[in-house]
Image (spheres, rainbow, N blue to C red):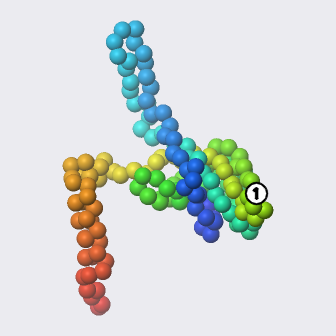
Amino acid sequence: MTVYFPQHLPYPTVENYSIKPGEAIIRTDMEAGPARQRRRYTQTPSKISVRWLMNPEQFCVFEAWYKYHAKEGGEWFFITLLGGIGLSSQEARFTQQFEAKLLNGYLWEITSELEIRDRPTLSEDAMAIVADSDFNLLMKTTDRLHILVHRTLPVKLN
């Protein structure tokens, strides 16, 4: 069964939000000369520190979802998280039990750490285009193309 984070619960806040990629290389120190390094994995999990602010009703839903659907944090689930390419759906699971703290007698602050299987990034081809282009000009061009296609061009109805 595919598990999803409840859509009506808030996104994690940006305060204290951090991404820590896993180690993908192995390093061997040499007796003489520079150390040698090589890539150990092509896909490394990353850790994301998260913090949610929820009202009592949202926290009630979160606790039940965590217990029954996320299996006390052990189950993989899909959640929308922020990364370098913006908000995207990612497969995650909890690496530690969440902590909930009552703020101002009303809001709940929930903190924890998530592990994601693979950070979404630009494709290698897209990265090559961005690296070989004037980034500001590229952004202006794509914005203008978006406006042309989605707002300016007439829609033909058959």
What percent of the width, then of the height, locates residue 28?
A: 43, 18
Answer above or below: position of 57 versus 152.
above
Residue 26 left/right relative to 125: right
Q: Is residue 12 left or right of residue 33?
A: right
Residue at screen point 55% across, 50% down: 17
Q: Residue at x 25, y 76 (%)?
A: 148
Give coordinates of residue 144: x percent, y percent: 25, 71
> Would you name the residue on which mark 1 appears?
102
Badge 1 amino acid: Leu
* Of the pair 43 and 61, the residue shown nearer to us: 61
The image quadrant that residue 150 belongs to is bottom left
The residue positioned 73% from the left and 58% from the top of the image is 103
Q: Is residue 59 above or below residue 25?
A: below
**Residue 92 visible from this viewpoint:** no
Is the C terminus in the top left, top right, bottom left or bottom right quadrant? bottom left
Residue 116 % position (x, y): 54, 47
Residue situated furthest front in the rendering? 104
Q: Which image quarter: residue 138?
A: bottom left
Instruction: Name, please, the residue furthest toward the bottom.
Output: 158
Q: Which residue extends farthest top?
A: 31
Q: Work out whether residue 71 or residue 60 is closer to the camera in this orientation and state it.
A: 60
For disc 1, the neighbor class at 10 Å (few under 14, some 14 to 19, many from 20) is some
Q: Is residue 144 above or below residue 19?
A: below
Find numbered disc 1 in the image and state the secondary structure of the residue it sits on. Answer: strand
Q: Is residue 122 above or below residue 25?
A: below
Q: Is residue 123 left or right of residue 68?
A: left
**Where is residue 100 shown, x and y percent of the image?**
73, 53
Residue at the far right: name it.
105
- Residue visible at 61% across and 61% down in the picture: 5
